Image (spheres, rainbow, N blue to C red):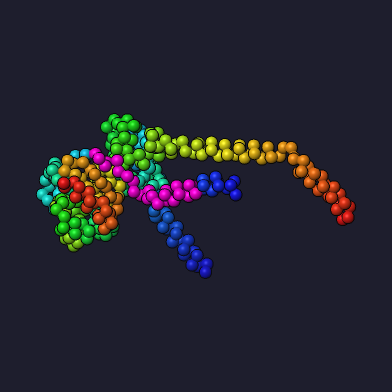
Amino acid sequence: MNAWRALLAAALAVHLLAGAQPPREARPLADDPVVEARLVAIAAELRCLVCQNESLAESRAPLALDLRREIRERIGQGASDSEVREFLVARYGDFVLYRPPVTPRTWALWAGPFVLLAVAAAVLAAAVRRGASRGAALSPQEQRELDALLASDAPREERR
Amino acid sequence: MKRFALPLVAFALLVVLLAAGLRLDPREVPSPLIGKSVPAFALPRLGGDGATFAPADALRGQPWLFNVWASWCTPCLQEHPLLMDLARTQRVALIGLNYKDRADDALRWLARHGDPYQATLVDADGRAAIDWGVYGVPETFVVDAAGTIRFKHVGPLTDDVLQRQVLPLLQELRR
């Protein structure tokens, strides 16, 4: 057993030493870091249409690579952020934006949660008010029932 | 009992809304190009001498179908018999866009399965397809005689889509 382990250790050592090289800097992926930074900033707010839960910046789908290339070229040609976004929306529609534009069509989407929250708050307020009002004065009948119950409670306690 | 009426109704409405939402397919992104002019582009023909073909110009005056396909795309094979049928029975020009493919693979695919296209254009890097808002293969567009995109179908064509949407639209466009 020991001999095998020694052999393995020796083989490993030879393998590692033979491939030893001084560490090198990884080559940067892009030529222009400024353009790349803008690309990532724009693409992070765009949806990848193939893997729809990934942003265009992080997706590795072929279409995402193509679209990033297009965006990179447009930035290189001097397009502004909104021009790049318009380019994509003109071809793929509003769905490509993570932030849907506020238009009459998307009004329900933007306002919906707040409207629902307001409705829920109103319903809650009404329920609380109704409950509170019911807890106010007891009718005479209810008062008598209450007294009877309270009176009958005492003997039951003693009997125990 | 009446107390439950309002929440029950609200719940029922919510169920209807969510059921409708669940039936929608997020992969079918509606195209903003419907109603817009065909993008201007010219591409070389598959198996041709390199001369470019611009369908927007060449096919003005008649409705035509634009089908994006690739030899590596399995659903394209699914819809292929329908396209062959279409080419044979309908008098409508069918132009193919070979998307991010290799020419010899594409030619071999057509030779093996049949070529329904009047012309197949080569889009090797996918740039032209981006102008059409293509995000997957296959996709099919219907273009009218004036060069306006009228309909887009994402995914393989089915008999259902053909009968209910494409053929009636073509009939209307031919009038």
- Give the number of marks: 0
Percent of width and height locating residue A40 = 38, 38
Q: Position of residue B15 (x, y in %)?
A: 48, 50
Q: Which residue is outermost to the right?
A: A158
Q: What is the residue that sits farthest to the front in this orientation? A: A141
**Image point (39%, 55%), residue name:** A18
Residue A2 in view of the camera: yes
Q: Which x, y percent locates residue A66?
A: 29, 44
Q: Residue furthest bottom?
A: A1
Q: Does the magenta-highlighted stretch encompass residue B32?
A: yes
**Residue at 18%, 62% in the rendered image:** B112
Q: Quadrant of the C terminus of chain A?
A: bottom right
Front residue of A140/B117: it is A140
Q: Is B128 covered by the magenta stretch? A: no
**Up-down: is A80 above or below B30?**
above
Residue depicted at 19% across the width and 56% down the height: B86
Q: Residue at x 41, y 57 (%)?
A: A15
Front position in the image: A42 or B24: B24
Q: Which residues are magenta?
A: B12-36
The quarter of the displayed image where residue A46 is located: top left
Give left or right: position of A131 versus B147.
right
Q: Is residue B110 visible?
A: no
Question: Which of these two is toward me, B1 or B64?
Answer: B1
Q: Position of residue B129 (x, y in %)?
A: 25, 45
Residue A88 lies left or right of residue A131; in this view the side is left
Is the residue B148 above or below the residue B168 in the image? Answer: above
